[in-house]
Amino acid sequence: MSGVSGGPTEVDRVSQDRALPDERATPAWRVVAGQECRDLWWGVRGPLLLLGLAMLLSVITYLAGSNQALNFLEQRETVNLTLQVAVAVGVLLTLAVSADALSGERERGTMEVLLTTPVSRRDLVLGKLVAAMSLWFAAYVVAVPYLWALARGVRVLLLALLLGLLVGTVLAVGLAGLGLLVSAGSTSNKVSVSSSLFLLLALFAPTQLPSGLPQGWFGDLLDRVNPVSAGLHYVSLVLVDGRPWAADLTYLSAPVVVAVLSVGASVLTAPRLVRLVPGRDR
């Protein structure tokens, strides 16, 4: 686990936690997820990451609120910008945690403890995935008051919240699964985290181009196959352009496909992924 120090007392505690599924008939993945969440939220890592997100959203909200020239359309666009920032950063935090899930255990010398506990490797992967997702939902809750402050007067708060929850959750699941796959195959924790962040940057960069992607069928194809740009484009179409939810659901195809494939691959291949050394049992 991420908080294991490797000492005898800590190892005993982890082993006892892993034995809970047999003693209490609790699903093993829930025990793993609970321990991972305690490591994440009882330490400084989770709260510190959320503090950084809150500071970023505070700056955006202050700048938007201090602009008295905002008209109706511009206010919708400000809500859209804030929502997209919250989704992007929340997904980034989820990816960073999942990228540390397996490579971090190896680097801290705690993977051997995990492999000797009475929990299947699929349960270990699923529990770590659930714990990483807890960071996304916490980031979503942090963003709610900022969206409420910016959406006053334009009646888009409920719409923004529903869009953020839907698109953000799908993106977070997909990238958390990718993060686990990268973490499993990386030789070090530094390689895993840096590779995952580079992947997110490559996916997110096209959404920030001044003129957007190239026009025409090729640009539209690039927009639709990139899960991050497709998801954020869908948010803009519904929130800013006022299009019906069902009119552009094809933009959610890539995020859903990535979520299903990455999580499915990480869980189904867990016996080969959770190793002391990438690709080998020892």
Image: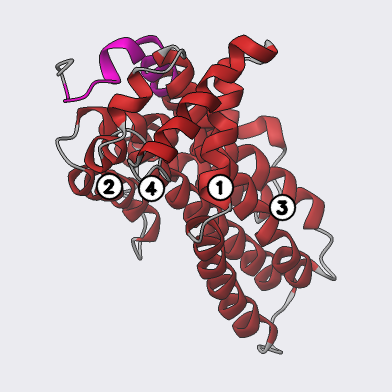
Which callout, 3 or 2, points to the residue nearer the camera? 2
State the image quarter where residue 274 is shown: top left
Label count reads: 4
Q: Look at mark 4 in the image and give the residue it sits on.
A: 96
User: What label does residue 193 carry, if any?
Assistant: 2
Residue drawn at point x = 21 percent, y = 24 percent: 276
Residue drawn at point x = 35 percent, y = 15 percent: 270
Q: CA distance from mark 4 to mark 2?
A: 6 Å
Between 2 and 86, the one lying in front of the other is 2
Magenta residues (range):
262-278
User: What label does residue 135 carry, if any?
Assistant: 1
Q: Secondary structure beneath disc 4? A: helix
Q: Is residue 251 left or right of residue 227?
A: right
Q: CA distance from mark 3 to mark 2?
A: 30 Å
The first of marks 4 and 1 along the sequence is 4
Residue 223: x and y, percent?
39, 40
Residue drawn at point x = 57 percent, y = 51 percent: 41
Q: Amino acid at mark 1?
A: Leu
